Image (spheres, rainbow, N blue to C red):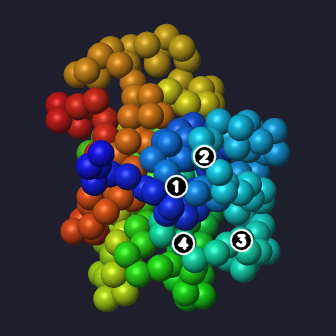
Amino acid sequence: MYNPFILTDKTLLITGASSGIGRATAMEASRLGAHVIACGRDHERLSQTLHLLEGAGHIPFEGDLLEPTTIDRLVSEVPALDGIVLSAGKGLTLPFQFCGREQFDEVFNINFFAPLELLRQLFKKKKLRPGASVVMIASIAGTGRRSVGNSVYGSAKAALQSMVRYTALELAPKKIRVNAVCPGMVNTPFIHSGALTEEQLEQDRASYPLKRYGEPEDIAHGVAYLLSDASSWVTGTSLVIDGGITAK
Ligand SMILES: NC(=O)c1ccc[n+]([C@@H]2O[C@H](COP(=O)([O-])OP(=O)(O)OC[C@H]3O[C@@H](n4cnc5c(N)ncnc54)[C@H](OP(=O)(O)O)[C@@H]3O)[C@@H](O)[C@H]2O)c1
């Protein structure tokens, strides 16, 4: 059956695959026919992801992306790739006055430097095939939706989106595409870090035009489009998936 969105036999590397959006993306990609290299830190959660994948040829990769040797190890071990999804990340909700260098490092290291260093090394070592698609998971916190306490996280995601455009330009001659996906609030462990109470989450949820937060699959479907050949003329852009909240 004709389907321009299939990922048959594409080899994809997905960070943050042990939870939330990364896991849902790994599952969706496997259903669409891809072979997934699923990366995460937590052995148990990563094993659960592997069990949820359809088809064969999936590989787990365990490691903390903030450890200097992890990226080297990952880059040397992976085969040639048709796509990467950089979903590993963490949030921080803290008033600006308490955000010193330590907080900036903590947030920028995993949300900004780690994905870009991984992309840089994969490109340099020629691990990205011509036609490969790179998808960075950014956030509406970096674009249209600013909220108190999110300055450092939002700035890291804004910087990431800026790099998406620069890298898209520089990698285009090799036919490698780079795009961002910017989710609104999505039901994953990420939003239950304790920054907002359940009551505050409920109020915020009600403010969304579509009257719900996203599910990880809502984001995975957008990522799958950007990984597929259906988006082969799309690069340097950001796909907002947010239940309409930034339209307000
Ligand atoms: N959920 C939302 O509302 C939302 C909204 C906008 C943007 N985002 C972005 O979406 C991405 C995924 O978030 P999520 O909601 O799926 O969060 P999540 O469920 O908390 O998952 C975070 C993932 O990142 C991995 N990770 C964190 N630090 C890592 C490190 N140092 N090294 C390797 N892996 C690391 C975790 O690995 P382990 O589980 O193995 O520790 C986990 O797989 C993040 O970049 C986040 O900023 C989320």
Q: Nearer the viewer, residue 42 or 99?
A: 42
Q: Which residue is mark 1?
A: 34
Residue 10 is at least partly visible in this image: yes
Q: Image point 53% across, 24% down: which residue? A: 196
Q: How far apart are the two marked residues, 4 and 1, measured between alpha carbons? A: 11 Å
Q: Based on the displayed image, in which of its 4 quarters is residue 140 positioned?
A: top left
Q: Based on the displayed image, in which of its 4 quarters is residue 106 positioned?
A: bottom right
Looking at marks 3 and 1 on the same chain, the residue that comes earlier in the sequence is marked by 1
Q: How far apart are the two marked residues, 4 and 3, measured between alpha carbons? A: 12 Å
Q: Are marks 1 and 2 in contact (CB under 8 Å)?
A: yes
Q: Which residue is mark 4?
A: 81
Q: Nearer the viewer, mark 4 or mark 1?
A: 1
Q: Nearer the viewer, mark 3 or mark 2?
A: 2
Q: Are marks 3 and 1 in contact (CB under 8 Å)?
A: no
Q: Nearer the viewer, mark 3 or mark 1?
A: 1
x and y percentages locating residue 178 in the rendered image = 37, 69
Q: Are marks 4 and 2 in contact (CB under 8 Å)?
A: no
Looking at marks 3 and 2 on the same chain, the residue that comes earlier in the sequence is marked by 2
Instruction: Name the secondary structure under disc 3.
Output: helix
| Mark 1: few/some/many CA within 10 Å (<14, 14-19, 20+) | many
Q: Which residue is mark 2?
A: 55
